[in-house]
Image (cartoon, rainbow, N blue to C red):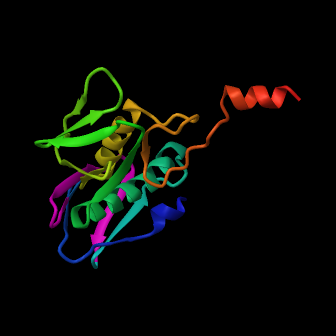
């Protein structure tokens, strides 16, 4: 049995949770999200807590969904109450990010600027070459941040590219350093 799945989820004040057959609807100050409960997983709401349980704890395929369901429901509650954000940092000469309405325009050394449209529920902001991707759905925020990073991932020789704030890029020595070491 999953250790995460067994933990009850506390419902914060200002958040309402309703259960319709196999659909959980969560409403909060930032918006509304819903989640479809997988088969063989039970969800109960009582005493300002959500409790997730399994119908058959011996089924290996459903055991994997047990902890996932609990984590997804916890993320919904956090999202509608506080929201999620990911920060990306641009590093490189001439690399810039700017807003054009609700869209993001990136100058990354290509022959043309790259325009990125925000998915529904996602907001971009740019300050000092740091792009902030914010929204209430953790999965969509992470997908959007990964999509932006994949346009120009950081390279290991000079460190140029788009990286997450706080991400460590392992640096490599170039050809000149390799040739000096081989000459000995």
Residue lying at 76% horizontally and 25% vertically, measured from the top left? 179
Queried whether the magenta region covers residue 40, the answer comes back as: yes
Name the chief secondary structure element in magenta. strand
Residue lying at 65% horizontally and 30% vertically, measured from the top left? 174
Queried whether the magenta region covers residue 30, the answer comes back as: yes
| Range covered by the magenta-colored residues | 26-46
Residue 97 found in image quarter: top left
Compared with residue 162, is residue 176 higher up or lower down, i.e. above or below? Answer: above
Given the current orientation, which residue lies at the most extreme right position? 184
Q: In x, y percent, where is residue 48?
A: 27, 77
Compared with residue 173, is residue 19 higher up or lower down, i.e. above or below? Answer: below
Q: In x, y percent, where is residue 31?
A: 15, 59
Q: How many marks?
A: 0
Return the residue nearer the eye: 25 or 132: 132
Return the residue nearer the eye: 2 or 130: 130
Q: Quadrant of the N terminus?
A: bottom right
Return the residue nearer the eye: 21 or 81: 81
Residue lying at 42% horizontally and 61% vertically, measured from the top left? 53
Residue lying at 13% horizontally and 43% vertically, measured from the top left? 102
Q: In x, y percent, where is residue 126?
A: 25, 50
Given the current orientation, which residue lies at the most extreme top position? 111
Does residue 21 appear in the picture of this structure? no
């Amino acid at each position: 049995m999953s250790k995460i799945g067994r933990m009850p989820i506390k419902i914060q004040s200002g958040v309402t949770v309703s259960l319709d057959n196999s659909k959980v609807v969560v409403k909060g100050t930032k918006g509304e999200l819903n989640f479809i409960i997988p088969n063989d997983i039970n969800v109960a709401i009582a005493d300002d807590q959500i409790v997730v349980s399994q119908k058959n704890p011996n089924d290996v395929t459903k055991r994997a969904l047990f902890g996932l369901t609990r984590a997804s429901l916890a993320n919904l509650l956090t999202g509608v109450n506080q929201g999620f954000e990911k920060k990306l940092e641009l590093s490189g000469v001439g690399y810039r990010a700017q807003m054009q309405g609700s869209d993001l325009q990136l100058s990354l050394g290509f022959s043309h600027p790259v325009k990125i449209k925000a998915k529904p529920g996602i907001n971009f902001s740019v300050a000092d070459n740091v792009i902030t991707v914010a929204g209430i759905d953790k999965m969509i925020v992470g997908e959007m941040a990964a999509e932006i990073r994949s346009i120009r991932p950081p390279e290991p020789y000079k460190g140029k590219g788009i990286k997450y704030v706080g991400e460590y890029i392992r640096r490599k020595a170039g050809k000149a350093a390799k040739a000096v070491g081989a000459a000995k």
